[in-house]
């Protein structure tokens, strides 16, 4: 299931998604805590497009999560991820983006490490 809502009001856009496996996997195929996994993921993002600058700029913040989705040698998704980013349109069909993310792993009893991690991404994107 997936939904996008927006624009909310003027330059604001909200996107929300939720995806879940239709049924549990066999434990031999995909196992979580001793039984067949039924993984799911969700995400919510709020973006704000700034006008009136020399170049179009978009600011965004997001939260994402998963359930039964940390499986060694399988999905290995974090339990929670928080993101913040900015994107600048350099010219038509060319943009430069900066994104920071913070991940929280599943607890040790759920097969994870219980640790957290940070990442910074710089992306030059061309559309054609």
Image (cartoon, rainbow, N blue to C red):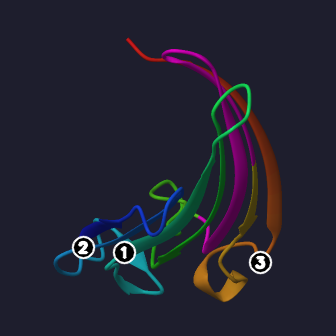
Residue interval drawn in magenta = 78-99
**Residue assigned mark 1:** 39
**Residue assigned mark 3:** 114
Q: Secondary structure at mark 2?
A: loop
Q: Mark 3 or 2, which is nearer the eye?
A: 2
Which of pointers 1 and 2 lies earlier in the amino acid sequence? Answer: 2
Number of marks drawn: 3
Verify whether residue 111 appears in magenta.
no
Which of pointers 1 and 3 lies earlier in the amino acid sequence? Answer: 1
User: Where is residue 127 shown, x and y percent of the image?
Assistant: 43, 17
Quadrant the N terminus occupies: bottom left
Judge the density around disc 1: few (<14), some (14-19), many (≥20) Cα neighbours within 10 Å. many
> In the rendered structure, are the residues bearing label 1 and label 2 in contact, judged by CB atoms less than 8 Å apart?
yes
User: Where is residue 63 shown, x and y percent of the image?
Assistant: 60, 70
**Residue assigned mark 2:** 21
Main structural element of the magenta stretch: helix, strand or loop?
strand
Q: Secondary structure at mark 3?
A: loop
Quadrant the C terminus occupies: top left
Residue 73 higher or lower than 18, as above or below: above
Residue 40 higher or lower than 119, as above or below: below
The dot on residue 70 is none
């Amino acid at each position: 299931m997936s939904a996008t809502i927006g624009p909310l009001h003027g330059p604001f856009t909200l996107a929300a998604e939720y995806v879940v496996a239709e049924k549990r996997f066999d434990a031999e195929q995909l196992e979580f805590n001793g039984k067949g996994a039924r993984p799911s993921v969700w995400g919510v993002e709020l973006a704000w497009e700034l006008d009136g600058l020399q170049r179009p700029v978009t600011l965004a913040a997001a939260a994402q999560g998963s359930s039964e989705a940390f499986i060694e040698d399988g999905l290995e998704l974090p339990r929670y991820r928080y993101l913040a980013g900015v994107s600048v349109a350099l010219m038509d069909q060319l943009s430069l983006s900066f994104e920071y993310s913070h991940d929280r792993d599943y607890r040790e009893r759920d097969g994870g490490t219980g640790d957290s991690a940070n990442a910074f991404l710089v992306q030059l994107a061309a559309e054609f």
